[in-house]
Image (cartoon, helix red, strand yellow):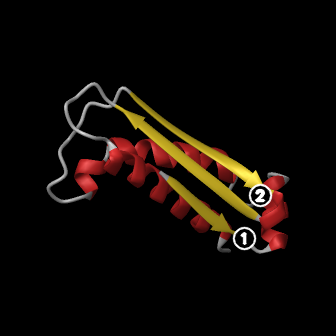
Amino acid sequence: ARATVVLEPRVYELVAQDKMKKGNVLAVAQIAGIQAAKKTSDLIPLCHNLVLNQVKVDCQLEPETSSIEIVSRAKTTGKTGVEMEALTACTVAALTVYDMCKA
């Protein structure tokens, strides 16, 4: 899954320089996304609880657009897809970026 959070240039510079009041935005967003993937079945009604073998959330600064590109991947050996877990990870990571930057 993929998400893009576009920031005001001033806020983007604070994130890039790790000077946001709430802490390291990219690290916190990554952790939030991973935690969210593990809780997908608690958040989405009728979504099956899966054993996840891997969840990756990568947050990349994009200076030309003052944005953060978030890419998430989830893997399981189960017989079902993990698209909901990847989407949830990406969504919560993006929401975390927004939350940390809104003030």
Query: Vertical placement of 51 versus 95: above or below?
Result: above
Task: Kindly identify which numbered label has been placed on residue 15.
Answer: 2
Mark 1 / mark 2, whichever is N-terminal? 1
User: Looking at the picture, which amino acid does disc 2 mark?
Assistant: Val
User: Looking at the picture, which amino acid does disc 1 mark?
Assistant: Leu
Q: Is residue 45 visible to the viewer in this orientation of the structure?
A: yes
Q: Position of residue 63 (x, y in %)?
A: 83, 59
Callout 1: SS: loop
Q: Position of residue 38 (x, y in %)?
A: 34, 41
Residue named by callout 1: 7
Quarter-of-image position of residue 37: top left
Q: Is residue 1 left or right of residue 14?
A: left
The CA span between labels 1 and 2 is: 9 Å
Q: Are marks 1 and 2 in contact (CB under 8 Å)?
A: yes
Q: Is residue 20 left or right of residue 13?
A: left
Residue depicted at 72% across the width and 63% down the height: 67
